[in-house]
């Protein structure tokens, strides 16, 4: 029997602002995406995750939605969206929208009404509280600002925002709010979209009474209190209600960005298929940090493979990804970019290691080209609210230096520089001045050059996706780890019936030994460099997929 379509397709994440500009204003748009649909088809993509394109003032690059049923003017019109949807479906590519319903923009009509009066019908669509002793209702810290509360002079109360001040949290305890959200989602489904990626979905429910956090205070004495706003008991009630009201009876899917998910609580939201279909966990994204996200530490292959193995064992079906719009470029953090040869080899190695495991691959735009972190040097080059807030909090030259090290290694703008289509003006992204700097290495890292090179990273991704799409064992077979204690090599077996694949990836810059000759695992079907089957070693960043049947 065929599996659900979202298990059998490779996803491609598009960050519209940086993908392709069609009108020369320096901002990517829907018509730009339409012009590149054949590129997606040629890559073997079966579904697109489209970052938010809704009307927004862009305090957080579209993740602050002003109108859930209007297209951002910079991106185009609803007619453009309809044409994009038709174009994708004509190519048998599904479309999954990015949806943010933990919070809205403070310019959304609900919040405009809510803050106008304590008696407004929308007042209870958000979380308002009286202060305590002239201060906030509790000591919660925000992801983006020291306090998770802002005071509103008009009504003399504080509103909760776990993110930026312009992103007030919605009050999911209000059934009228929930009904509005479900009706909006169903109208998108009726248009023909195939699913939703739900932003910070695990934060919808807050602890009753909004108690103070008890952790270590940060700036201003505020405490990051995820124990009171992540994976709260009522979350499951809301997700099950959403499933009944929106997803049941439709051939669609829902993948959740589940901040603070663990291997212990993951099955509470994906275990029985009555809440989410898939979840994004971020343990893999934390392997090169210690404490704060901004405190980058050297990459350790053993830690990387242990996290992947832990999640393969924890849940039946994983999301497989190396980066997204919130993460730095994968090859810059997990691979090696010191030489062109190692850059190319390590980018291919990472792809083979991650995307042939059991689960659904999610490739972030430009990753298939080996795009790298950008050489940001000044505050004026940055666009991300998180990075700018980090710099604003610095009180000394030493703090500023630490912040810049973190931004260069882990900043979100690294993933948001324009897609590198060619070596021409602005990397072929726009005829106008791009909204954010183009990475200067577009002169040699670009799609046009890689299309002509059969040994390119792009060519390797096409081969890998074609192999995965054609193999029942790689699509839905079992997974078994090999060499779990090895500090360099990630190795596993995928099998189904008589078909068996062994994946061997040296994630380090040093030669690595194997317990037997490579040929013992079968015949090679995918490799990032020529393989000597009599050898019992792997070269730095060598990746090899062998089939035995």
Image: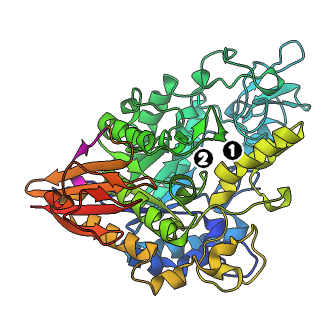
Q: In this view, does 131 lie to the left or right of 127?
A: right
Tell me where the magenta segment starts and ends, as one range.
476-484
State the image coordinates of residue 236 (x, y, percent, origin top left): 45, 29
State the image coordinates of residue 470 (x, y, percent, origin top left): 23, 68
Q: Can residue 494 be seen in this view?
A: yes
SS of the residue under disc 1:
loop
State the image coordinates of residue 242 (x, y, percent, origin top left): 46, 39
Q: Name the residue under label 2.
A: 100
Q: Mark 1 points at which residue?
A: 104
Marks 1 and 2 close (CB-CB < 8 Å): yes
Say which quadrant the N terminus sits in.
bottom left
Residue 477 magenta-drawn?
A: yes
**Cα–Cα span, label 1 and label 2:** 7 Å
Residue neighbourhood size for the residue with mark 2, other residues' Cα within 10 Å, grouped as few (<14), some (14–19), many (≥20): many
Q: Residue at x 29, y 49 (%)?
A: 491
Q: Is residue 383 left or right of residue 214?
A: right
Q: Which residue is drawn at 68% across and 44% down?
A: 104
């Amino acid at each position: 029997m065929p599996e659900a379509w979202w298990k059998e397709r490779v996803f491609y994440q598009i960050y519209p602002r940086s993908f392709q500009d069609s009108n020369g204003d320096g901002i990517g748009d829907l018509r730009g995406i339409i012009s590149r649909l054949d590129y997606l088809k040629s890559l073997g993509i079966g579904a697109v995750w489209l970052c938010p394109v809704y009307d927004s003032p862009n305090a957080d690059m579209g993740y602050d939605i002003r109108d859930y049923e209007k297209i951002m003017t910079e991106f185009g019109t609803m007619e453009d969206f309809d044409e994009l949807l038709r174009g994708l479906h004509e190519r048998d590519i599904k479309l999954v929208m990015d949806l943010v319903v933990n919070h809205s923009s403070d310019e959304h009509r609900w919040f405009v009404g809510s803050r106008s009066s304590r008696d407004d019908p929308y007042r209870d669509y958000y979380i308002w509280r009286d202060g305590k002793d002239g201060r906030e209702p509790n000591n919660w810290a925000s992801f983006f600002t020291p306090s998770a509360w802002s005071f509103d002079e008009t009504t003399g109360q504080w509103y909760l925002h776990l993110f930026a001040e312009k992103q007030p949290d919605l009050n999911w305890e209000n059934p009228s709010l929930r009904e509005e959200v479900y009706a909006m989602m169903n109208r998108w489904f009726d248009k023909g979209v195939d699913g939703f990626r739900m932003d910070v979905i695990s934060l919808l429910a807050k602890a009753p009474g909004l108690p103070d956090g008890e952790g270590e205070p940060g700036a201003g004495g505020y405490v990051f209190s995820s124990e009171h706003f992540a994976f709260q008991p009522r979350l499951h009630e809301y997700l099950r209600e959403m499933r009944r009201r929106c997803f049941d009876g439709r051939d669609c899917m829902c993948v959740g960005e589940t901040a603070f998910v663990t291997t212990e609580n993951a099955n509470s939201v994906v275990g029985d298929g009555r809440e989410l279909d898939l979840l994004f966990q971020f343990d893999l994204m934390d392997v090169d940090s210690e404490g704060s996200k901004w405190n980058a530490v050297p990459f350790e292959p053993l830690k990387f493979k242990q996290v992947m193995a832990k999640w393969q064992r924890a849940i039946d079906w994983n999301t497989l990804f190396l980066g997204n719009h919130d993460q730095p470029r994968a090859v810059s953090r997990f691979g090696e970019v010191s030489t062109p040869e190692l850059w190319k080899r390590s980018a291919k190695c990472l792809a083979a290691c991650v995307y042939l495991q059991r689960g659904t691959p999610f490739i972030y735009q430009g990753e298939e080209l080996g795009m790298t972190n950008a050489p940001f040097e000044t505050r004026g080059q940055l666009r991300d609210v998180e990075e700018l807030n980090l710099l604003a909090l610095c009180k000394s030259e030493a703090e500023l230096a630490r912040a810049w090290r973190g931004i260069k290694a882990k900043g979100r703008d690294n993933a948001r520089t324009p897609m590198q289509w060619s070596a021409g003006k602005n990397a072929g992204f726009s005829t106008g001045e791009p909204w954010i700097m183009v990475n200067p290495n577009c002169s040699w890292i670009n799609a046009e050059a890689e299309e002509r090179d059969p040994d390119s990273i792009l060519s390797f991704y096409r081969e890998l996706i074609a192999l995965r799409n054609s193999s029942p064992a790689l699509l839905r077979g079992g997974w078994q780890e090999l060499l779990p204690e090895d500090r360099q090599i990630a190795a596993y077996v995928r099998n189904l019936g008589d078909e068996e694949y062994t994946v061997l990836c040296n994630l380090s810059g040093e030669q690595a030994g194997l317990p037997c000759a490579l040929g013992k695992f079968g015949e090679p079907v995918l490799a990032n460099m020529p393989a000597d089957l009599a050898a019992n070693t792997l070269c730095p960043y060598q990746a090899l997929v062998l089939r035995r049947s």
